């Protein structure tokens, strides 16, 4: 049974299960991004894929409960969806997902279900990305065109996107980037899970040597902007350009020289593709713009509500029973 506040209850299970938060004794963690790992930090009993448990540093791993299976989500290494057998029905919680394959993980797997609880990060019809191959080609061309004369700094989230950009630079451009120490620590975990990433840790003797000529680096997203480029340009007496790969580049002005709309989330087209493949009777829009996405889906003829409306619907059903 789907409960208010993003929880489910399984037949025969004493405890409720929290979906990507810490407000229950047993919690599902869909992936290792910090906005989904509150239960790990609170030292609650958690279940997830082995990769997510390792990347998130989980200490209180719990076996996956009977009646639940985990499906690939495609968002980042180890990201998973929860598919549950309830009382006579099935439910899938997508967490953050993406259907297309990335450099470090396979795309999401879709399974038919009665109730689909899905993310709504890009749940707006205006959010439709160009083809992934087209974006990657633009990124490769930009790197090759500029790196001979300028140093390039990519801003990326420390876990997930930084490793994607590292792998892109390795495989598509033949470049070994300098990465921040925090990003390098995560790269080491990725390598322990079988993902090879060629990079040089900032502050090392090798990185100091690389800084003499135009280089490519990856730094935490919140530190990369025009001010950083100006400081580095003066410090190393060379031109410095900044870039990022994020879905928000589609329609937002970012303080960077170049932004590419490469996302690890599904765009609106992939959301519709997932819904049609899962064929649910009801859709619950969560993790972002739930009410906005539900309204768009309702106009398209889907039975959709926002996660904030679950309590109201349960109360209405009880009244009518």
Image (spheres, helix red, strand yellow):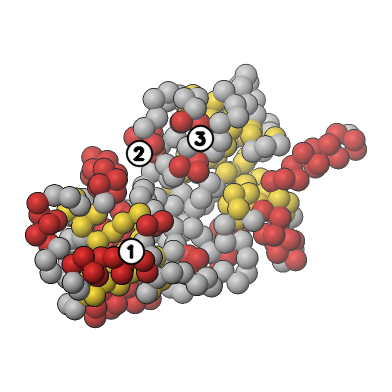
Give how far apart the Cα atoms at labels 2 and 1 are: 29 Å
Q: Sequence order check: which comes first, mark 3 or mark 1? A: 3
Q: Sequence order check: which comes first, mark 2 or mark 1? A: 2
Q: Secondary structure at mark 2?
A: helix
Dots 2, 1 in contact, CB < 8 A: no
Give how far apart the Cα atoms at labels 3 and 2 are: 14 Å
Q: Sequence order check: which comes first, mark 3 or mark 2? A: 3
The structure residue drawn at horizontal position 56% and vertical position 31%, both measured from the top left corner, is 22
**Residue of label 1:** 228
Give how far apart the Cα atoms at labels 3 and 1 are: 31 Å
Q: Report which quarter residue 255 is drawn in.
A: bottom left
The structure residue drawn at horizontal position 48% and vertical position 65%, both measured from the top left corner, is 247
Instruction: Give the percent coordinates (x, y) of residue 242.
Output: 33, 69
Instruction: Give the percent coordinates (x, y) of residue 271.
Output: 57, 60
Badge 3 density bin: few <14, some 14–19, many ≥20, Cα 10 Å: some
Badge 1 density bin: few <14, some 14–19, many ≥20, Cα 10 Å: some
The nearer-to-camera label among 3 and 2 is: 3
Q: Secondary structure at mark 3?
A: helix
What is the number of the mark on residue 280?
Answer: none
- Image quadrant holding the N terminus, namely top right
In this picture, residue 144 sits left or right of residue 253 = left
What is the number of the mark on residue 55?
Answer: 2
Q: Nearer the viewer, residue 203 or 164?
A: 203
**Residue of label 3:** 38
The structure residue drawn at horizontal position 17% and vertical position 77%, both measured from the top left corner, is 148
Badge 2 density bin: few <14, some 14–19, many ≥20, Cα 10 Å: many
The nearer-to-camera label among 2 and 1 is: 1
């Amino acid at each position: 049974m789907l409960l208010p506040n993003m929880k489910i209850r399984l037949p025969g299970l004493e405890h409720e299960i929290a979906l990507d938060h810490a407000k229950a004794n047993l919690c599902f963690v869909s992936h290792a991004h910090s906005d989904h790992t509150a239960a790990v930090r609170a030292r609650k009993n958690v279940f997830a894929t082995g990769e997510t448990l390792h990347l998130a540093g989980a200490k209180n791993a719990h076996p996956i409960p009977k009646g639940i299976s985990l499906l690939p989500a495609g968002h980042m290494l180890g990201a998973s969806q929860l598919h549950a057998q309830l009382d006579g029905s099935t439910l899938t919680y997508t967490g953050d997902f993406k259907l297309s394959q990335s450099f470090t993980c396979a795309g999401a797997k879709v399974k038919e279900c009665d109730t689909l609880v899905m993310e709504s990060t890009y749940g707006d019809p205006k959010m439709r990305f160009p083809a992934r191959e087209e974006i990657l080609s633009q990124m490769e061309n930009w790197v090759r065109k500029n790196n001979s004369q300028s140093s390039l700094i990519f801003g990326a989230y420390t876990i997930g996107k930084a490793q994607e950009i590292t792998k892109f630079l390795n495989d598509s451009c033949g470049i070994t980037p300098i990465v921040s120490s925090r990003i390098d620590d995560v790269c080491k975990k990725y390598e322990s899970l079988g993902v090879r990433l060629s990079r040089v840790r900032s502050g090392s003797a090798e990185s100091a040597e690389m800084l003499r000529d135009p280089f490519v680096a990856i730094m935490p997203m919140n530190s990369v902007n025009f001010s950083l480029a100006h400081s580095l340009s003066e410090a190393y007496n060379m031109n410095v350009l900044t870039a990022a790969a994020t879905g928000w580049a589609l329609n937002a002005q970012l303080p960077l020289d170049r932004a590419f709309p490469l996302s690890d989330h599904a765009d609106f087209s992939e959301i519709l593709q997932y819904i049609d493949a899962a064929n649910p009777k009801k859709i619950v829009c969560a993790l972002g713009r739930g009410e906005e996405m539900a309204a768009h889906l309702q106009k398209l003829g889907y039975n959709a509500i926002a996660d904030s409306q679950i309590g109201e619907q349960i109360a209405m059903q009880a009244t009518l029973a």
